[in-house]
Image: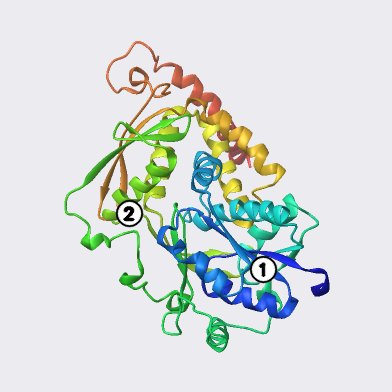
Amino acid sequence: MSKQIKKVVLAYSGGLDTSIIIHWLKKEYGCEVVAFAANVGQNEELSGLKQKALKTGASKIYIEDLTKEFVEDYIWPMLKAGAVYEDKYLLGTSIARPLIAKKQIEIAKKENADAVAHGCTGKGNDQLRFELTFKALDPKIKIIAPWRTWDLKSREEEIAYAKKYGIPVPVTKKKPYSSDRNLWHISFEGGILENPWNEPPEEMFLLTVSPEKAPNKATYVEIGFVKGIPASINGVKYDGVKLIEKLNKIGGANGVGRVDIVENRVVGMKSRGVYETPGGTILMTAHQALETLCLDRQTMVWKKKVSDKYAELIYAGFWFSPLRAALDAFVDQTQATVTGTVRVKLYKGNCTVVGRKADKSLYQPDLATFEADTVYNQYDAEGFINLLGLPLKVQALVNKKK
């Protein structure tokens, strides 16, 4: 395949893996390498990326600001679906990958490239998220995954490779854990975290203070939603990017959004991941609370099933699948009445719902009250209970005969 490849578009972050992949691709394939870096909200990590990519051998680099698209076309649909993987992981890395891969394919077509490449390992989930997107959007494009073919077997060997060829990298042998950051979250894995007994070092966290150092006074925040989409904070309207950025600061200052889990990777192994998702934690908590007012019981039961499946699809890389599109139609229907406001209380790592109201709330005080009412005839409950309990009664009579 190496003779057929003249130009490759590489998903480039400037981290350890992609820093040496540029050099490796040119050495192994003798091809031109075009780097592509997506701005999905990683902020200062993009600083100096252009110079670094060109210095390490890329012919050019695209740096695309995808933050608006990331929020509106990926994060908001995920939030409306209530997608949380294994009830803990808010899918920060997972949801960004299909957008990055989609843009990578667009650049490959623009550049008339023969192949696309990524720096994902053969053990992880990200290889699925990139390559399933590649296959869905351009089934004929060639895919290069160096981690599955090169002789390097560890991060230590990568660091040695970089040192041998004079490639600057941001990781040392003393601190080998890696991180991935975007507008929604930041993740940490590897190194000391590979032992699930080890507590994450406090200096590792970037978005949140420790609960112990959070303010001794609670912070109250009101989130306004329109058809399931966050629209305001404390009555002030924000666009999606600014809204998440502001909630990240508010939540982070109160120690909200830390998650330390052992999750099940798609490839079959378990892995330990530590995540910071302060704004996302607030939004997911508030959105779920608003749905309890706006969705009837049967819809909520099925919404939970859809939420779990939606999370699985994102986690496994099936964003561009017919099923995900079909589930979106269901989700959008459920969100038609999810308009209202939720008040949350943030205190030392906790995010607690303390108030909620909705324009079309199904919660009716005159029905739920313990006081006197003229709407609900309590005597009707007797017939309801008789019918509901009929199978139990029949079973008991049968058992008694035996």
> What is the x, y in percent for residue 364?
37, 20
> Can residue 72 be seen at all in this image of the molecule?
yes
> What is the x, y in percent for residue 285?
39, 43
In whole angstroms, how far apart are the C-alphas of marks 1 and 2? Answer: 41 Å
Q: What residue type is labelled 2?
A: Val
Dot 1: what SS?
A: strand
Dot 2: what SS?
A: loop
Q: What residue type is labelled 1?
A: Val
Q: The N terminus lies in which quarter of the figure?
A: bottom right
151 sits left or right of 197 in the view: right
Which residue is more in the foreground, 206 or 49? 49
Q: Mark 2 points at which residue?
A: 256
- Please determine whether, in this image, residue 157 is positioned above or below residue 85: below
Q: Name the residue under label 1.
A: 33
Q: Looking at the image, which residue is at 75% across and 57% down?
A: 112
Q: Looking at the image, which residue is at 35% across and 66% down?
A: 205
